[in-house]
Image (cartoon, rainbow, N blue to C red):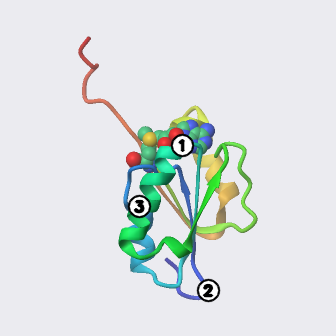
Amino acid sequence: MRAHRTPTCSTWAAGRDAWLPRALQAHDAATAVDVGISDAGFDRTHAEALRCGVADRLEPVRHDVTTYRPTRRADVVLGVGAAYAFGALLPALAAAREHLAADGVLVLGDCFREREPSP
Ligand SMILES: C[S@@+](CC[C@H](N)C(=O)[O-])C[C@H]1O[C@@H](n2cnc3c(N)ncnc32)[C@H](O)[C@@H]1O
């Protein structure tokens, strides 16, 4: 994350992943919002944030990520396995522009299948 100001991170539905708590652990001035709609996802992220000692810098925001408008644009947006909420990859990339600071970075992880699932 950038060092010239207090870095901010926004996550689309952190859920089970440990990216957000680990990012906060690695950047001890950074703050983050986790935008999601899943209580179980928030619970898991909070538990991991507590384990990493960063829960005080993590704000859970219960909101549909597709209509969420941040009060402050983020230096980093993490979107792992949540691009489908926007319907497709290109709308997700377009939405990221609304969430990112001018020199911000999007880290996008998307899902794909190597083969059709068996019945
Ligand atoms: C496949 S999970 C990925 C969770 C996490 N990033 C991970 O890798 O484990 C997708 C998540 O997106 C959330 N989600 C789906 N649609 C959403 C929406 N419109 N707004 C916010 N979160 C949404 C679901 O609740 C779920 O937690």
| Residue furthest top as drawn | 119
Q: CA distance from mark 2 to mark 1?
A: 31 Å
Q: Residues within 10 Å of mark 3 (few under 14, many from 20)?
A: some
Q: How many labels sit on residues?
A: 3
Q: CA distance from mark 2 to mark 3?
A: 27 Å
Q: Which residue is mark 1?
A: 38
**x then y, percent, for residue 31:** 57, 74
The residue under label 3 is which amino acid type? Ala
The residue under label 2 is which amino acid type? Arg
Q: Is residue 43 above or below residue 38?
A: below
Residue situated in front as seen by the camera: 52 or 85? 52
Identify the disc placed on residue 5: 2
Disc 1 versus disc 3: nearer the observer: 3
Disc 2 versus disc 3: nearer the observer: 3
Q: Which residue is mark 3?
A: 47
Whether the residue under disc 2 has CB within 8 Å of ligand 1: no
Residue positioned 62% across, 53% down in the render: 96
The mark nearer the N terminus, 1 or 3, is 1
